[in-house]
Image: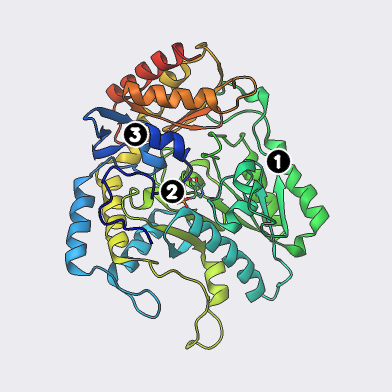
């Protein structure tokens, strides 16, 4: 083993960075060393406006004092407690707060540590639920093209992003995919697009082929974020809900991005007025500060497991850190902040201003589509011929130099700021982005 005790602090080789061009990054690293409110501070002392709430998670802004204090206090009081056959009060309190803010009918919470784990948990619960009710043949899962459900095997199997699946073997069997809803007629739509509700009917075709008696669940993001912000066409989610209900198939909304105010409501389900049977969450649950995820389920699902001998474990699933005290404390302080500071209302109030600022970029070089909802937005660029992703990534680098953090996926720029944003921040973000796009090759 090599001796690393004298490793220079600036040796970057050991950390194999996730979803990163490691060699490129390490030649010219971009380091944040501090953050406050809407801004990061870079290692060279520059302020960078956070246009993406980190990775769609810092909804209450950085270093939120309530959350900082809650974590510090919790660390000194109860740092860790096991969640298998033991409990601590804050995990139960947080579950109650989550149920309070969830749509009617979501009554139970299963804790995880990330969005990916929430997805695995929901898929496993779906299959086990049908078995518990005596319908053990219902094991097939249905996802959607361009869906992002994290990076674990279940998630990439139901997910629909090619590069995330391509190099990882045969994945889960028994998975079908519905088509995505991104169609050219809807370019430059403000909010929910008019066209495409009928794409939901493809689900009927898949059900006819696989038979409902073999299908456990459909999983979709109510608004697909990571793939580049694809809004559900008007009426689409309602149709998916109706078809799943008709065939006894569970509907899982992956709310890892849409949860906690991103669209101006507590959840995508609340925003769109369509209630699924399960919801997967993470990210904004703890403001991204301490890893935590949660799956919310209906009474019906939960109760199907609560049968038989009361002394026996009902679900053989869980994580060492499920409901961890530090994460629970961070979650409670985060939810309190959303409420006390009216952050979902702020997102709702500013959505119109945000929409206008975003759509003002129409007509800039290479811009081929702009999409938005709540405090989320996407600007799609035409790719450089033969070099997909390169143009948007250059925009990302230029934006960082200009003092704004944006995110790119393919040739799409995605924006999702902390919900504490003001009109002045929106002006700064789009002012700088306009300059970046004007000068982009
Ligand atoms: C909809 C959705 N599901 C799941 C995930 C995975 O979450 P995590 O990175 O916390 O595992 C993400 C992450 O962006 C997401 O957007």
Which residue is at the front of the view, 351 or 112?
Answer: 112
Q: How far is disc 2 from disc 3 in space, using C-alphas?
A: 15 Å
Q: Residues within 10 Å of mark 1 (few under 14, many from 20)?
A: some
Percent x, y of residue 364 = 50, 12
Of the two numbered discs 3 and 1 in the rendering, the one whose residue sits closer to the viewer: 3
* Depth check, front residue: 184 or 146: 146
* SS category of the residue bearing label 1: loop
Give residue 426's position: percent from left, percent from top. 34, 24
Q: Are marks 2 and 3 in contact (CB under 8 Å)?
A: no
Q: Quadrant of residue 60?
A: top left
Asked whether, in this view, residue 289 is left or right of residue 440, the answer is: left
* Residue lying farthest to the front in this orientation: 2
Within 10 angstroms of label 2, few (less than 14), some, or many (20 or more) residues?
Answer: few
**Disc 3 element:** loop
Query: Would you name the residue on which mark 1 appears?
Result: 179
Q: Is residue 81 above or below residue 214?
A: below
Mark 2 and mark 1: Cα distance apart in space: 34 Å
Give whichever of discs 2 and 3 has the lower sequence position. Answer: 2
Q: Quadrant of residue 307?
A: bottom right
Rendered-image quadrant of the N terminus: bottom left
| Residue 192 visible to the viewer | yes
Cα separation between marks 3 and 1 = 37 Å
Secondary structure, mark 2, is loop
Colour scheme shown:
rainbow
Q: Earlier in the sequence, mark 3 or mark 1?
A: 3
Q: Which residue is mark 2?
A: 16
Pick whichever of labels 2 and 1 is earlier in the sequence: 2
Q: Position of residue 124 (x, y in %)?
A: 58, 66
């Amino acid at each position: 083993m090599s001796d690393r005790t004298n490793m220079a602090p600036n040796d970057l080789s050991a950390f194999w960075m996730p979803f990163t061009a490691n060699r490129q990054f390490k030649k010219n690293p971009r380091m944040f060393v501090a953050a406050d409110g809407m801004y990061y501070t870079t290692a060279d002392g520059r302020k960078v406006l956070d246009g993406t709430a980190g990775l769609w998670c810092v909804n209450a802004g950085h270093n939120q004092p309530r959350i900082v204090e809650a974590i510090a206090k919790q660390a000194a009081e109860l740092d860790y407690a096991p969640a298998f056959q033991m409990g601590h009060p804050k995990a139960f309190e947080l579950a109650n707060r989550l149920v309070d803010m969830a749509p009617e009918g979501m009554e139970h919470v299963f804790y995880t540590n990330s969005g990916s784990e929430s997805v695995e948990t929901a898929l496993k619960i779906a299959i086990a639920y049908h078995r518990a009710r005596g319908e053990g043949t219902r094991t097939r899962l249905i996802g959607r093209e361009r869906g992002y459900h994290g990076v674990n095997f279940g998630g990439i199997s139901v997910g629909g992003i090619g590069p995330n699946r391509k190099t990882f073997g045969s994945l889960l069997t028994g998975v079908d995919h519905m088509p995505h809803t991104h169609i050219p007629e809807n370019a430059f739509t403000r909010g929910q697009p008019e066209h495409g509700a009928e794409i939901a009917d493809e689900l009927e075709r898949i059900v006819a082929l696989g038979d409902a008696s073999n299908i456990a669940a459909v999983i979709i993001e109510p608004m697909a974020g990571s793939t580049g912000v694809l809004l559900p066409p008007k009426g689409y989610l309602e149709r998916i809900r109706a078809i799943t209900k008709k065939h006894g198939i569970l509907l899982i909304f992956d709310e890892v991005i849409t949860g906690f105010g991103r669209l101006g409501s507590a959840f995508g389900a609340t925003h769109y007025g369509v209630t699924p049977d399960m919801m997967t969450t993470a990210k904004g649950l703890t403001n991204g500060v301490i890893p935590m995820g949660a799956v919310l389920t209906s009474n019906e699902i939960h109760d199907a497991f609560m049968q038989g001998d009361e002394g026996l474990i009902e679900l053989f699933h869980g994580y060492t850190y499920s409901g961890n005290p530090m994460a629970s404390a961070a979650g409670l302080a985060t939810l309190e902040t959303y409420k006390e500071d009216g952050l979902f209302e702020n997102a709702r109030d500013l959505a119109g201003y945000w929409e206008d600022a975003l759509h003002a970029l129409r007509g800039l070089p290479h811009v081929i589509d702009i999409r938005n909802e709540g405090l989320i937005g996407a600007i799609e660029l035409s790719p450089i011929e033969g070099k997909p992703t390169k143009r948007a990534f250059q925009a990302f680098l230029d934006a960082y130099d200009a003092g704004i953090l944006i995110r790119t996926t393919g040739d799409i720029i995605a924006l999702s700021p902390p919900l504490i944003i003001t009109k002045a921040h929106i002006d700064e973000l789009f002012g700088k982005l306009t300059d970046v796009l004007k000068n982009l090759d």
